[in-house]
Image (tube, rainbow, N blue to C red):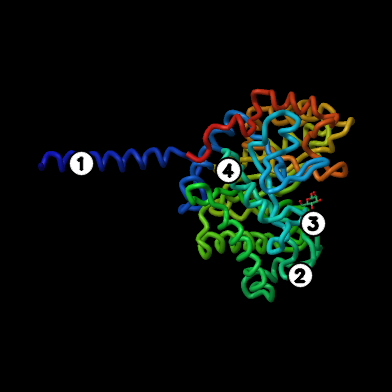
């Protein structure tokens, strides 16, 4: 009896020691210590995969494409129509949260269904937020000093909190088949070093911007009890690491260091800028024990860009040991003939896109290992 008790205690001690050891071995930790098991697993697996290849992502891919629109029951994508595989990363946007449809006409109820289905199929969901000015009809592109007014003590603070309640309700509704919260990579207040959004550098101080982030994440996690959120920071084109980090909310708030860059990826002419930007983001991410990603890019799918997928995008991403460590690249939406960033059937870029998919370095939905275990 005694012996077996000693044995059990021994096993327990070993188990704790081993558990702690394996935990401290994982260099990258989520900023949310209460993150759900699936959220933790996703982060760990993203980190692992980042060493091996690049995940491909597309905004609104399941909702519509060039010349078609989905309903809640369909699972379709221009990416699938061209290459027979789905993106590994599904991008969504909750601009106009509180309305029936988002900023681009996607019904929020359908978006919920597609997010859960994407998760069930083993994919990854990332949510950006082209938020209008809270409590007004003014768009994300409002050039006014709003951020200071949303912070505690500001005249729009309560309005902002009410908006966050809507965001929280949306995220809380995302449940997997076992009732578990679906992990989300949340990427609000993006491209903030530009001046085109109200949260941009011209319209708030670095400190106000950081406070906005912290308020938002604390509210969702601590007040609303959401623990399925991985956070992603994503400046636009930048000139230096200092500029990239100027408004960084801090290692305890950000899990993924992203970067939005259309300009330097337009052609191979600007490869030096593109590669340096990617290198810088990966280097900073490594210094901070975080994951790096190219969170938005893309070109029009026209004849001028026919070989873009392999000769520009993949060439830049695989140009060096550090650029290869990006976790994913996401291209923006296929709104129609006016705006299209992923190949679609008949597009002049289709062959190049197929070659991009066939490259062993790229990872699509069907290539993913289990991400939530
Ligand atoms: C922009 C454009 C807009 C769209 C917005 C939010 O880049 O695609 O048409 O409304 O993103 O998705």
Q: Secondary structure at mark 3?
A: loop
The residue that appears at 70% across and 39% down in the rendered structure is: 76
Which is nearer the N-term, disc 3 or disc 4?
A: 4
The residue at label 3 has a CB less than 8 Å from ligand 1: no
Q: Residue at x 53, y 53 (%)?
A: 252
Gap between marks 3 and 4 measured at Cα: 34 Å
The residue under label 2 is 136
Residue, disc 3: 195
Helix, strand or loop at label 2? It is: loop
Q: Are marks 3 and 4 in contact (CB under 8 Å)?
A: no
Q: Given this view, does label 4 or label 2 mark the residue nearer the observer? A: 4
Mark 3 to mark 1: distance in Å? Answer: 62 Å
**Mark 4 and mark 1: span between their CA atoms?**
39 Å
Out of 245 and 144, give the one closest to the viewer. 144
Q: Assess disc 3: are there few (<14), some (14-19) or many (≥20) residues with their C-alpha within 10 Å of its C-alpha.
A: some
Q: Nearer the viewer, mark 3 or mark 1?
A: 1
Tell me the distance, in whole angstroms, between the alpha carbons under discs 1 and 2: 62 Å
Q: CA distance from mark 4 to mark 2?
A: 33 Å
Of tags 3 and 2, the one toward the viewer is: 2
Question: Which percent across, then down, holds residue 372?
Answer: 51, 40
Q: Which residue is mark 1?
A: 8
Question: Which picture quadrant has residue 138?
Answer: bottom right
Please state if 351 lies on the left or on the right of 14 as rendered.
right
* View extreme (left): residue: 1
Residue 198 quadrant: bottom right
Is the Cβ of the residue at disc 1 closer than 8 Å to that at disc 2? no
Dots 3, 2 in contact, CB < 8 A: no
């Amino acid at each position: 009896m005694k012996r077996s008790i000693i044995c059990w205690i021994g096993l327990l001690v070993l188990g704790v020691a081993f558990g702690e050891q394996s935990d401290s071995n994982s260099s990258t930790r989520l900023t949310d210590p209460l993150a759900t098991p699936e959220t933790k697993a996703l982060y760990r697996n993203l980190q692992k995969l980042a060493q091996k290849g690049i995940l491909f992502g597309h905004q609104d891919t399941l909702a519509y494409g060039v010349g078609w629109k989905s309903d809640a029951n369909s699972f379709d994508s221009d990416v699938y129509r061209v290459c027979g595989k789905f993106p590994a990363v599904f991008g969504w946007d909750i601009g106009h949260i509180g309305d029936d449809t988002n900023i681009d006409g996607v019904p929020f109820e359908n978006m919920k269904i597609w997010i859960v289905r994407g998760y069930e199929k083993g994919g990854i969901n990332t949510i950006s937020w082209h938020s209008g000015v809270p409590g007004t009809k003014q768009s994300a592109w409002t050039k006014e000093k709003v951020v200071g007014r949303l912070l505690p003590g500001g005249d729009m603070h309560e309005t902002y909190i009410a908006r966050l309640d809507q965001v929280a309700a949306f995220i809380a509704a995302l449940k997997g088949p076992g009732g578990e919260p679906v992990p989300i990579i949340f990427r609000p207040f993006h491209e903030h070093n530009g001046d085109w959004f109200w949260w941009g550098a011209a319209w708030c101080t670095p400190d106000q911007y950081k406070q906005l982030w912290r308020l938002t994440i604390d509210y969702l996690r601590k007040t609303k009890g959401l623990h399925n959120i991985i956070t992603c920071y994503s400046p636009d084109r930048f000139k230096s690491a200092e500029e990239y980090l100027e408004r960084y909310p801090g290692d305890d708030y950000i899990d993924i260091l992203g970067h939005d860059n259309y300009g330097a990826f337009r052609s191979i002419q600007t490869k030096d800028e593109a590669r340096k930007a990617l290198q810088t983001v990966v280097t900073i991410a490594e210094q901070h024990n975080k994951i790096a990603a190219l969170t938005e890019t893309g070109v029009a799918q026209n004849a001028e860009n026919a070989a873009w997928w392999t000769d520009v995008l993949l060439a830049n991403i695989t140009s060096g040991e550090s650029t290869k460590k990006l976790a994913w690249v996401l291209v923006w939406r296929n709104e129609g003939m006016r705006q299209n960033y992923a190949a679609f059937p008949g597009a002049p870029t289709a062959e190049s896109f197929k070659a991009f998919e066939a490259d062993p370095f790229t990872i699509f939905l069907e290539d993913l290992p289990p991400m939530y275990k």
